[in-house]
Amino acid sequence: MKLRLLLISIITAINIVACQHKQQAPISTIDSTLQVNATSILEEKLSEINAQSGQVIVMEVQSGQIKALVGLTRKDSANYQSCENFSVWQSTGLMHPISLLAALETGKVKLSDKVDTGNGIYQVQGRELKDHNWHRGGYGELTVQEGLAASSNIAIYKTMEKAFGDNPQTFFDLLTNMSYGKPDSINGIASLQPYKITEKNITWNCIGYEQLISPIQVLTFYNAIANNGKMIQPQLYKDSVVVINPQIASRASIDSLKKALVFNVTDGLGQPAKSDKVLVAGMQGTSSLSTNEDSTKDMYAVEFCGYFPTDNPKYSIIVSINKAGLPASGGLMAGDAFRQFVDKIMEK
């Protein structure tokens, strides 16, 4: 069964880049060995945490070439099947660094600023904004960098309050200027939909809710961070490099965020992604995809996105897994899978 799944995964990856022009077939960017390894690692992780589905995408930072593209889903049987749907459209738990980058661009905040997260529950417009450790009394006072490393929703929101005050539209304008949610389409990936805000509300948008975005669009943004601000079009067959945005943000803001993403892996909740073979940077995230009376049936997205080596990034990777019920941890689940992908690439 495992061999059959690996073969199907390779065939699927090759098929999605099949040429529509009969005269000259394009050369696939997929690395067949890495595709096999990624499929095996993802399948084991999905089985371990009893997940419904998952995908992993490995991309070269400077070229945008996709080296592995794996999607697995569990349907009627207990076995995972290869899935060609890479246009999954949902909220994301990986928004914190992107919001922080926008805040840094205003010049009104810096990583060393203090922010009080209190007891982990913050009232905003009649609704409760919670940190994941609210039942343990919250984090209290943190620096902005520590808040990011703790995946604190309150730290991020209060940072946004300081940066954008009574003019939240500036935040959304910055997201547009930074090309967040691009690209709208990728040759070889069917039905990829443009990023969409379902309700414009900075409180929830800044932490990844009330928006719809696919993992490959999130990866495109993180890849731009790794690439010092240059956003590259992902591609599934070898072609000339296409630049979406030559500079999504100032180099100073990018450098600050890169520092924070390294700190997250060395000292924060991103530590499960830490490799002993190379220094990596990235961010974990967990988001609720549904609300049911029976919490065991709630769907969660657990994700990790990052890049390596941090001093001269070569690869960026996103791991996005959907599972029902708790526990659900982007760091412990997706972050651990990310580490395994990194180690496998470094071995090669």
Image (cartoon, grey):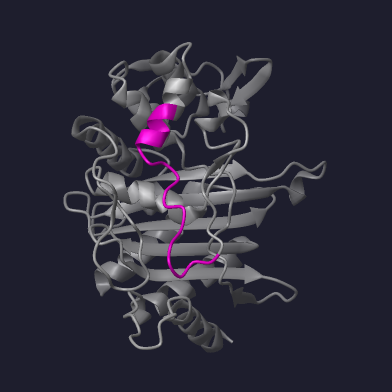
Residue in view at x 56 percent, y 57 percent: 321
Q: Is residue 176 left or right of residue 198?
A: left
Q: Quadrant of residue 253?
A: top left
Q: Do we see residue 140 in this rendering?
A: no
Asked if 62 appears above or below 173 in the picture, the reply is below
Single out the residue that lies furthest toward the top. Answer: 166
**Residue closest to the eye, 206 or 38:** 206
Between 334 and 246, the one nearer to me in the picture: 246
Q: Seen in the image, is 341 located left or right of residue 301? A: left
The answer to whether 19 appears left or right of 321 in the picture is left
Magenta-drawn stretch, dominant element (helix, strand or loop): loop
Q: Position of residue 256 (x, y in %)?
A: 24, 32
Q: What residue is drawn where x is 48% and y is 11%?
A: 166
Question: Height in image: 285 above or below 250?
Answer: below
> Looking at the rendering, in which quadrant would you find the N terminus?
bottom right
Q: Which of the 4 quarters of the picture holds residue 286?
A: top right
Quarter occupied by the C terminus = bottom left
Rendering coords of residue 63 (x, y %):
25, 62
Q: Is residue 55 visible?
A: yes
In the rendered image, residue 180 lying in the magenta stretch gets the answer yes
Residue 2 position, x and y percent, is 54, 84
Callout count: 0
201 left or right, relative to 40:
right
User: Residue 182 in the image: x percent, y percent?
Assistant: 42, 48
* Magenta-drawn stretch contains 292: no
Q: Residue furthest right?
A: 293
Q: Which residues are magenta?
A: 173-190
Q: Residue furthest left?
A: 311
> In the image, is residue 97 above or below residue 119?
below
